[in-house]
Image: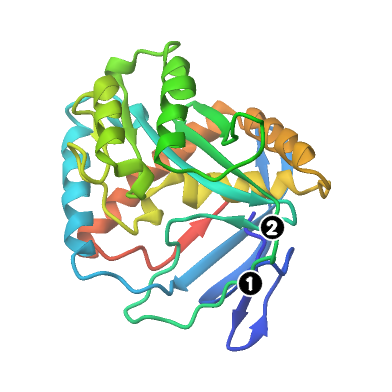
């Protein structure tokens, strides 16, 4: 569930928290109910007709090249799309604000976007990877004293070495691809070399063997599905401590069913189809649906 305050032409549409206020154009905002394997959930579907962050000149071509590559792989490699580990981290604030480093909003011109944050936020920085049928994580970035910290290159590589690679021991890593975005901690030479040691040429990343196109949240399941789905349940009981928030995140992620993840990945292949027809433009209606 997307639960932020959206201001459209100065009018507030809906809000679960006032931690974030973004000016967007929205074609609709509605509450819905969905049945998932017999369980009924109240859900929220937000459809944007235009997102509001400036598109860089070369983004369209980068997106087209990536989609062309992916669509060529799908018929050649059985279940190729089900072998991609999509990964990223996000900040979960104790007050209910969830921040993602990547851009979520696009426009042909630089917009006026305002984001309100607490002055002294208490937060967790959480990493996970998602693929068809399973989530690896969550991993919480902490220092040697157990205090919550944000991610940097050294901490990201420590996570890969001490958490991610051991988790892969239960899977055939030789058949898996790994995707990450272009954050600096992800793309340092030492990080890329570390990931190549495990995945070889099966690395989708800026400066990797396969380039991940920037500003492509409409192609990243952690953006268009997971973070909103997790948030809607993590904050349901209004956690008052970081330990409580961490427990909720772990519980909610463990409750996400494999069939739902299968559906998310199948939806990803449908999203690929849009890019060539749009000449690389972002999807005009990005639907966050849980």
Q: Residue at x 58, y 72 (%)?
A: 115
Relative placement, left or right, of 268 versus 123 is left
Q: Please, is residue 69 above or below residue 157 in the view?
A: below
Task: Tell me where residue 249 sits by quadrant.
Answer: top right
Q: Crowding near pointer 1: few (<14 within 10 Å), some, many (20+)?
A: few
Q: Residue at x 40, y 55 (%)?
A: 217
On-image quarter of the N terminus: bottom right
Q: Earlier in the sequence, mark 2 or mark 1?
A: 1
Residue 162 at x, y = what percent?
Answer: 47, 20
Q: Please, is residue 259 above or below residue 92 in the view?
A: above
Q: Residue at x 16, y 38 (%)?
A: 72
Q: Please, is residue 99 above or below residue 153 in the view?
A: below
Residue 86 at x, y = what percent?
Answer: 40, 37
Q: Which residue is mark 1?
A: 116
Relative placement, left or right, of 53 versus 289 is left
Q: Which residue is mark 2?
A: 121
Q: Residue at x 50, y 58 (%)?
A: 287
Count of numbered marks: 2
**Residue 90 in view of the camera:** yes
For numbered disc 1, what is the local secondary structure? loop
**Residue 290 in view of the camera:** no
Label at residue 136: none
Task: Tell me where residue 200 sits by quadrant.
Answer: top left
Task: Calculate the distance from the C-alpha at mark 2 to the C-alpha at mark 1.
Answer: 11 Å
Residue 88 at x, y = what percent?
Answer: 45, 42
Relative placement, left or right, of 94 versus 272 is right
Q: Please, is residue 273 above or below residue 146 in the view?
A: below
Closer to us: 225 or 262: 225
Residue 174 at x, y = what percent?
Answer: 27, 16
Q: Crowding near pointer 2: few (<14 within 10 Å), some, many (20+)?
A: few
Closer to us: 268 or 139: 139
Closer to us: 52 or 241: 241
């Amino acid at each position: 569930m997307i639960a932020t305050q959206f201001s459209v032409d100065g009018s507030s549409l809906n809000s679960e928290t006032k931690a974030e206020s973004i000016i967007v154009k929205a074609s609709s905002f509605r509450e819905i109910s969905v049945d998932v394997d017999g369980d009924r959930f109240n859900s929220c579907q937000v459809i944007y007709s235009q997102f509001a962050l400036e598109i860089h000149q070369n983004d369209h071509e980068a997106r087209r090249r990536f989609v062309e590559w992916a669509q060529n792989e799908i018929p050649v490699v059985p279940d190729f799309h089900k072998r991609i580990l999509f990964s990223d981290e996000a900040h979960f604030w104790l007050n209910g604000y969830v921040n993602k480093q990547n851009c979520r909003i696009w426009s042909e011109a630089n917009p006026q976007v305002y984001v309100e944050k607490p002055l002294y936020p208490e937060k967790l920085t959480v990493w996970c990877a998602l693929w068809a049928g399973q989530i690896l994580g969550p991993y919480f970035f902490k220092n040697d004293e157990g205090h919550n910290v944000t991610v940097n290159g050294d901490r990201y590589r420590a996570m890969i070495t001490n958490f991610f690679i051991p988790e892969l021991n239960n899977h055939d890593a030789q058949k898996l691809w790994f995707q990450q975005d272009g954050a600096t901690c992800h793309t340092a030479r030492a990080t890329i070399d570390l990931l190549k040691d495990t995945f070889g040429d099966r690395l989708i990343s800026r400066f990797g063997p396969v380039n991940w196109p920037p500003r492509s949240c409409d192609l990243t399941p952690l953006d268009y599905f997971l973070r909103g789905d997790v948030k809607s349940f993590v904050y349901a009981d209004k956690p008052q401590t970081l330990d409580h928030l961490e427990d909720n995140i772990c519980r909610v992620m463990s409750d996400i069913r494999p069939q739902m993840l299968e559906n998310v990945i199948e939806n990803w292949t449908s999203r690929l189809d849009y890019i060539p027809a749009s000449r690389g433009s972002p999807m005009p209606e990005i639907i966050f649906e849980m």
